[in-house]
Amino acid sequence: MEKLQFHKTHLPVLLFLLQFLSLAYALQDDYFINCGSATNANADIRNFVGDMNSSASISSSFSFTRHSSAVTSSASPTLYQTARIFRSNSSYEFDIQSNDTYFVLLHFFAFSSSTDLSTALFDEFILRIVPGKFYVYFLPKESSFAFINAIEVFPAVDSFIPAVAPQISPAGRNISDYKGVIFRTLQTIYRINVGGPTATITPENDTLWRNWVPDDGYINNSETAISKFLASKPNYNANIAEMISEKTAPNLVYQTAKVLNSSGQSSLPNITWSFDVERSARHLVRFHFCDIISEVPNTLNFTLYIYSKFSTLINSFDYGYELAIPFYVNFVVDSDDSGRIDISIGLYNDTFDKTAFLNGVEIMKILGNSGLSLNEHKERHVFPIVGTILGGLVLICILVVVVFFVFKCRKPKPIENSDWSPVPTHGGGSSHSRTTGGTIPNMNLGLKMPFAELQFATKNFATKLLIGKGGFGNVYKGTLRNGMKVAVKRSEPGSGQGLPEFQTEIMVLSKIHHRHLVSLIGYCDERYEMILVYEFMANGTLREHLYGSDMPHLSWKQRLEICIGAARGLHYLHKDSAGGIIHRDVKSTDILLDKNNVAKVADFGLSKSGPLDDTHVSTTVKGTIGYLDPEYFKSQQLTEKSDVYSFGIVLLEVLCARPAIDRVLPGEQVNLAEWGMLCMKKGLIEEIVDPSLKGQIDPNSLRKFIETTEKCLQECGTDRPTMGDVLWDLEVCFTASTNCNAKRAT
């Protein structure tokens, strides 16, 4: 008998079709459906009705139910013990009575491949629905399955989605008011309880059954903030500007806050949070506030920042004249190529108030015709609104493309018998991948790896093997069948790792090989995945050994060896690789260390190939704030000297053991490049040297190191040295340090 084996992939082929028809009889307003079941299931105070007995009807030419015997423990919600599986285009039909804003939640749990309920997923959408019939369509691809465990449809607050909100560009400019948000569909990305306890606010503690997670994983510098809690309930009725209630956000969100630390322990003027989002997308960002820190009613002014460039005044008295009045503000925020939205709160210039606070944040992706594109003529997903006249009535059909999980039906093949084996990192050789029809054409197939092999290597991407996380997605430690240790970088939908970067990394690393450049073992583009497999670097990133972790301090000798190794790698890219390559994103997190602390440059997703001559390369500015060459930023002319500037920042990090941007410090010290150059000019550089290095550095070695760093950071690229010159100077530093140590030993 053929066995079903489920493999989750993210594919933009689940389609919502919202078709609204006029009805003349009383209708239900909320639905909680236990799919694939004839029995009900309880989840907190919600009763999920089995879809075989529900008033919501199913339309399908072929569907069946599936019950799991693997999740029958008392701790496992019965909600995830059944599923309805579709082999053909199918739909659920709901009768809607009220013209209102609704939450639509879809629950997915592949119980056939896991018994861990933490892997259960759900997608939450918020949209306006007029009275009539509402359909949720499932459109499986040929020879595939669609499935669903549970569906929720219930009304929110009528004013939950604003009609208009200020629109902020990635450059921090207020473009205009964005109109028509209320007619868009929103997909919840983040819902954050700022300053709340470490535990998540679960649906049973929220009037609209939402999850709110703590902000600890998103705040950049926790020492800049302290958490506050108010025991009494928020004063909802005192808000004079807008209707607000517990349905806007639960009490606990407004009873807790992060407050700017004014105790003197931190001199940073701002608290900053960073959120990874889809690149070049549009989001509704909602900020929740409630003054729980003032002792008497008073005007409290502070500044809210978006992307550090846009700022707006927050004045609690705009919403009422009592304490603990909840309020919120909305912005439509466009993301850029970094795939990140930064928000901050800080002091207002013209006020005596020495504090600022934030209670909650919600980030919702705006679906529809609102996605950004660098080229408006490029193909992109659109969400047309189609109107048709029928008997004097307007039938409105809104097509919304969202994430769909496809599960292949096939006979299981024993993974132990895989015939794949790694190929040389130069490329070449024949492909042993058994996939066809991948997403990436014309790639180096000698490096292509089956998805099943990577599942085996990472134990199906087990959380315990997670060793890194960033804008691109997650990095897992893996072990191939031949025993080779690898690092598996798996991009996630909506993450910072895009298709161009994925392709660039493969093409660059398949052509080059050097002791001080990380080696690409393989890649996978099956099932719309974007996965890169590298040699495993046991000692992590250079940054982790300088600050922000409990790793042992590096000696001056070790730091010089690491800098020399990285310089050799970059020099090879510029001069010895085919055609020349500019890295374009040199930073301390992209310098990796193996078990012997040998440095290797990594992350070539933004690199630029081509002849590196005096003609320069005109290109869209990309890179990381704090490391970005100011000349490149102004002129958009990329040269190898842009890498030299970024490497100069890394040299300063190595010397000072602090980040390139550190908002904890006073204003003039926030930017390491500016602060370092100022100290060099004043002859005060020794004052900012890492305290753990005091007494270790030979004066001649330090003098040459500072001189080299200063040359790298010259404002004009032509005044900077080549990477070959930098390498030579660093070797001089190392020789001076070695000679000094030899003299001390004698």
Image: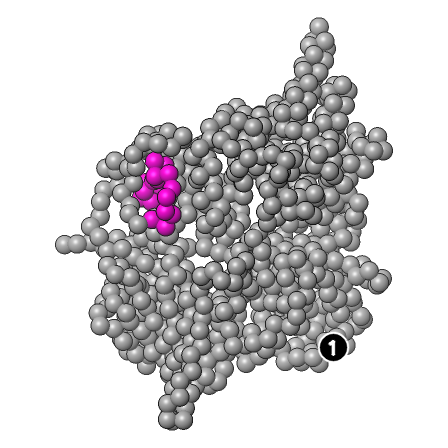
Q: Residue at x 72, y 10 (%)?
A: 744
- Could you say where residue 505 lies in the image, as x and y percent from the top left? 47, 40
The foreground one among 1 and 264 is: 1
Compared across the picture, whether 148 is left or right of 182 comes to: left
Look at the image and tell me whether residue 457 can be seen: no
Q: Is residue 394 above or below residue 448?
A: below
Task: Tell me the quarter of the image containing the N terminus.
Answer: bottom left
Q: Is residue 238 above or below residue 746?
A: below
The foreground one among 552 and 688 is: 688
Q: Residue at x 22, y 45 (%)?
A: 413
Q: How many marks?
A: 1
Task: Tell me the quarter of the image containing the C terminus.
Answer: top right
Residue that numbered label 1 is attached to:
320
- In magenta segment, residue 359: no
Tell me the magenta residue range.
438-455
Count residues near mark 1 (Cα–Cα under 10 Å), then give few for <14, some for 14-19, many for 20+: many
Furthest residue to the front? 615
Compared across the picture, whether 491 is left or right of 65 comes to: right
